[in-house]
Amino acid sequence: MCLMLGAAFAAPLLQRFGLEGGILHLYGPSSSGKSTLQRVALSVWGHGRDAGHSWNATGYALTNAAAARNDGLLSLNEIGEDSKQAVETCAYAIANGRARLQGAKEGGNRPELRFRVLAISSGETSLQAHFGKQGRQMMAGQMVRCPSIPHRLEDKHGFPDFRAFTDHLNYTAITTYGSAGRLFIQILMKDITQAEKRLKTLYTAFLGEAHDCHPMTAQQGRSARIFALCAAALMQASDWGISGISAEAAREGVMQAFADWYALQPRGSYEEARIREAAERFPLLLPRFVRLSEGQMFYPNDWAGYVWDEANGALYDVLPAVFVAHFCDGDKERIADACDILGGKMGWLARPAGSRHGDRRWQHRRKVRGNLLRVYRFKGAQLPVAGEEEAEEGKDT
């Protein structure tokens, strides 16, 4: 709840902190209070129910809704109701603050729609899982701007059960609303210089604590800024007597949400994590290999390459097109990075004999039945174990 409340107060501060915006997505089981927390956040500025939107809309409508809430909070409920891949087409646009550029009937283009919003979203699955259901993958930039946070109710706050607690929040969000946001802006504008100085102190302190407790990549550090701004805004609202909770409770609440998100993140870049996931799926390709040692003449329609045996085990020669499709999601621009990770870091992809350290030409040449082919050579059908991987890295150095 602290994160959602913090997002409400942080939304008008994005530009002051040089942040483009983003989407904070809560996910968890049905009837676990996700929508209730969105209503509480909405009640900071308006009606806790009627001021929100659903993902069940066209992409054009969603970007219009975002533009109408420029420098404000946008709430999108129930990602499972996504209409015609609205999440896929609009998630990055909303976080990046630019609608799709469209041509005009009279010629030229329509005016470009730009905005800056902090969106809150909810659903039973994470954004990554939702993209996966559509047969797509989130890009690294989308994952940076749109963190998915697991949700669960943990404290009844003096109520007999969680249902009584959420019923109280739902009722309050539609009967008492709008005044907290207006008061926040009024106090902020009385001495904007001093208030901004205090906010930046809180922001920097939270970000520093997050980095000290959780070693982060540059990508994760960018996501942490959104959490830090939410914490700073809610702590400031608490200091001004607006939020109804203490500043320390606000900090701890947002930090816990950040820790829950961080626990599910890869320890490397998102691109590296994706390549590792593809590596774990490599055994699924095995039926598509032609085994030369057995004189196999039959080539499957989805032929992936050759497998042959040597003293140290089987080697798998993968065709370039299959390599790009499996490890690079069809993007040839990512070949070099994939080779560096699979070969340099994992020690699984074999470098051609005689190639210099740092050389990115990882393709082998081999002649099969009179045809000269270029292939990527893998040492075995599975990732090397940690010890073998370290040994291979030691050889390269």
Image: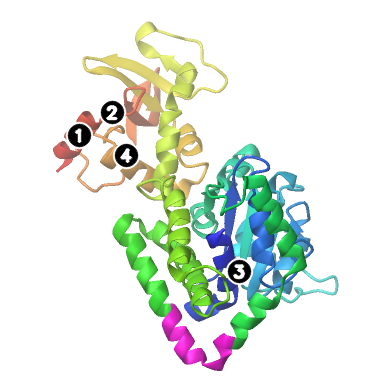
User: Which label number is shown at residue 392?
Assistant: 1
State left or right for residue 281 relative to residue 166: left
Circle nearer the N terminus (3, 1): 3
Badge 2 or badge 3: first in the primary sequence: 3
User: Is there a contact, CB below 8 Å, between mark 3 and mark 1?
Assistant: no
Quick one: label 4 or label 3, which is nearer the N terminus? Answer: 3
Q: Which residues are magenta?
A: 187-199
User: For the C terminus, which image quadrant?
Assistant: top left
Q: Are marks 4 and 1 in contact (CB under 8 Å)?
A: no
Residue on which the image places disc 3? 8
Secondary element type, mark 1: helix
Q: Position of residue 173 (x, y in %)?
A: 71, 63
Q: Amino acid at mark 2?
A: Pro
The amino acid sitting under disc 4 is Trp
Decide: is 294 above or below 364.
above
In depth, the one of 327 and 150 nearer the eye is 150
Instruction: Answer whether residue 382 is magenta in the image.
Output: no
